[in-house]
Image: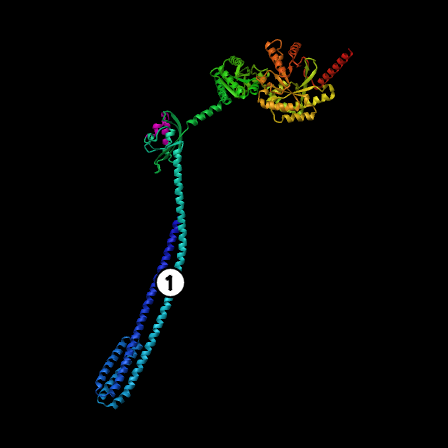
Amino acid sequence: MNRFRKLTTGSKLIACFGLCLLLASLVGGMALVQMSSMTQASEGMLGEVVAGEKWLGEFHVNARRLRTLEMEHALAPSADQPGLENDMLVAEAEAAEGLREYGRTAMDSYDVDNLRRLQADWSRYLAMHEAVLPISRRQNKDLTYAELSGAMRVQFLKTRDLTDRMADWNYRHGVWYGVRTRQLYLHSKTWVICLLIAMLAAGGTIGFFTTRYLTGVMRDMENEVAERRQAQTALQAREQRFRALITNSLDVFAILNGEGKVSYISSAVVSIWGVPEEKVLGTQGRDWIHPDDQARSQALLAQALETPGRNVTTELRILHGDGSWRSSEVIVNNQLGDPAVAGIALTYRDITERNAFEEQLKHQAFHDVLTGLPNRALLMDRLDRALARSRRQGMDVAVLFIDLDNFKVVNDSLGHEAGDNLLTIVAQRLLSKVRQQDTVARFGGDEFAILLEDAAPGEAAEIAERVAAEMGQPLCIQGRDMFVTASIGLALSLDSSGDANGLLRDADIAMYQAKASGKAVTVTFDRSMTARAAERLEMESELRRAIEQGQLRLHYQPIVSLETEQISEVEALVRWEHPTRGLIPPGKFIPIAEETGLIVPLGKWVLEEACRQGQEWREAHSENLSLLIGVNLSTRQFQQEGLIEEIKEILERSGLPPASLKLEITESLMSARPEDTIAKLEQLRAIGVHLAVDDFGTGYSSMSYLANFPVDTLKIDQSFVQRLGSNSESDAIVQAIMTLAKALNLRVTSEGIETDEQRALLRGMGCDRGQGYLFSRPLTSLALTELLTNQFLTNQSDNIERRAA
């Protein structure tokens, strides 16, 4: 619109400019024509003046000639007079003709009056001439001359003077008129030229601004043309991109005409549907839709027809070229009113793989990835449904909560891959021992749960026994046979609070009670366990405060030489002196500390206190200089960053020599990341501390790594020691450990010695040291100080007696 207005304005300026030029041309032309006419008129008038002067001169000459001929005729002989008369006639005729012609050029009243006077005077003169001529013929010369010299001469001179004045006036009047006419012409021409210049200047100005304006308009038009070309180029590029997208898209694009036939199909139909384009074109769109989806397809088209220009989406199954049905998301848009389309546009997006992936995600969301068992979410959903049915039908629902015993040892000793294999085997065994309607789920880690629906009285306990018996069977992991037991908690809906979370919590509480009862047992929930679970939670909170408030105490159990029965080492054992509960044994709070991570600050406190006490004993009695202080390092404590620097700082603060400290590690560390473990043990050995393997014999593969570990001592687990003499397998295992230790030049300490028989057997096998209730229970630092003093005094007395003997 703006450009149209600019063009209209430019046209008006051009019209004004043209009009100015036209007016200037017309005015100038008319002025020039008028001036030319005036000039021509003035020139004609001047010509007439000149002609009149000419005829007046002609009259004047012939009049003088006539006067002269008259004088000659009067004086001439008679013989010459006829010829002179003829000449006079000619002169008279020519004078008359000159006067007559002059009368034709008379221009104003002044000329007419002078002409009349001149004609009157000339008539009188001619009358006198006619009167004198006969006298001349009579040869009366005197009379003739008198006439000629008298009145005729006066008349002639009068005529001549009048003629001269007329000639002079005509000349001056003609010249003045011609000059004035020329000046007027020149002035008019100058004004006309100035007017033309002014009008041309105005027209030029208008033309300049018009040109400038039109140049801007042309520039705008050029820019608009360029923009339109760019827009057209961009449109072509978009069209090419659109064609490329349509051609290479993973979606199938189609257009149905008003009859429902396919009028266009994109080339993607070949790769997506597995059929050529020409096979689809011209067919009915519904022919490619699954029969069960026909009704939904018709409803989709009806909705699209009711809402032109809007996308309507649904999911349909489309026939593939291989005869299968592929799920597709179909988007329909009614474009029948668009002349460029004139059809119904459809977009088919194959979502078969997406649906499969969604099903997979749904399965993964409710199933354990490793074992394929239902996870906690699915179990809780099924438990809610089972409880709802049980309330309607009066049937009992039971939950078994299963936790594998010592599963961490398998992970630490054999690695996580072996642990995963173990979990998979356990899952299959659990499935083999339940009914078809029951649900076996994995809760994560080494925890499983079994939902028993419609369990008859006593049936849940029977299933729990079958599961426990199956778990006691040997497993083959990485070519090794091993035994894995499980602690099982059983909860029944009739004994629970009634909801899914409550029933599961009760089974969990029963499982922890089974763990506390020595593992590998099944415990059925009763309401008293809830109080014990709350007590355990309270104990965890109080344990945190106990570390901060200094409620922990160390007891020391002597380790004696089986040969001399003298105390050579002491093992630091932590106790919790609760302000209200009294002394709490480690079996009640150490597992809690390990689960919560409190074992790290607790272990640090034990190490600091043991080193401080050991240095105190060394300073009090010189005989205690060789006494070793044994401190247990938990797996988590051993694996923490900065352990080496921490031990160095503790030894430096306490003043205890590194050679007086023995650090005891669990056997599982020997097979869990052995390279890292060996590197850290080498660093500890470089400090100067002694290293021992605690509870040796309970692991699975530590003997294969033992030769590479820089340890000093093996401590045989008390489970083997307590069966000595009554179990040949235990005797063989202990004897094998002794033989291996001697071969590797390691000391051996047996734990849990309670009888003289056990001591004698171990001493006979070559065991170096022993530890157990046979020698001493764990003692406080004061009691152990007294024991060490008594040992010193006894040794002194024996030495004196031997010297006296």
Q: Where's residue 270, x and y in %? A: 37, 30
Specify the quadrant that holds the C terminus.
top right
Q: Where's residue 526, x and y in %? A: 57, 16
Residue 756 visible here: yes
User: Between residues 180 and 366, which one lies in front from this camera angle?
Assistant: 180
* Colour mapping used in the image: rainbow
The residue located at (30%, 71%) in the rendering is 44
Q: Where's residue 595, x and y in %? A: 59, 22
Q: Where's residue 285, x and y in %? A: 34, 30
Relative vertical location of residue 101 with respect to residue 464 in this rendering, above or below: below
Is residue 454 a member of the stretch shown in magenta?
no
Residue type beneath disc 1? Leu
**Disc 1 crowd, CA 10 A, few/some/many (<14, 14-19, 20+):** many
Is residue 288 a member of the stretch shown in magenta?
yes
Within the image, what quadrant is residue 604 found in?
A: top right
Relative vertical location of residue 19 with respect to residue 301 in this rendering, above or below: below
The residue located at (40%, 47%) in the rendering is 224
User: Between residues 245 and 170, which one lies in front from this camera angle?
Assistant: 245
The residue located at (78%, 12%) in the rendering is 804
The residue located at (41%, 49%) in the rendering is 220
Residue 499 visible here: no
The residue beneath circle 1 is 196
Residue occupying the far right of the picture: 804
Q: Is residue 782 left or right of residue 17?
A: right
Relative vertical location of residue 341 with respect to residue 62 in this rendering, above or below: above
Q: Main secondary structure of the magenta part?
A: helix
Tag count in the figure? 1
Q: In terms of secondary structure, where does tag 1 sit?
A: helix
Magenta-drawn segment: 283-302
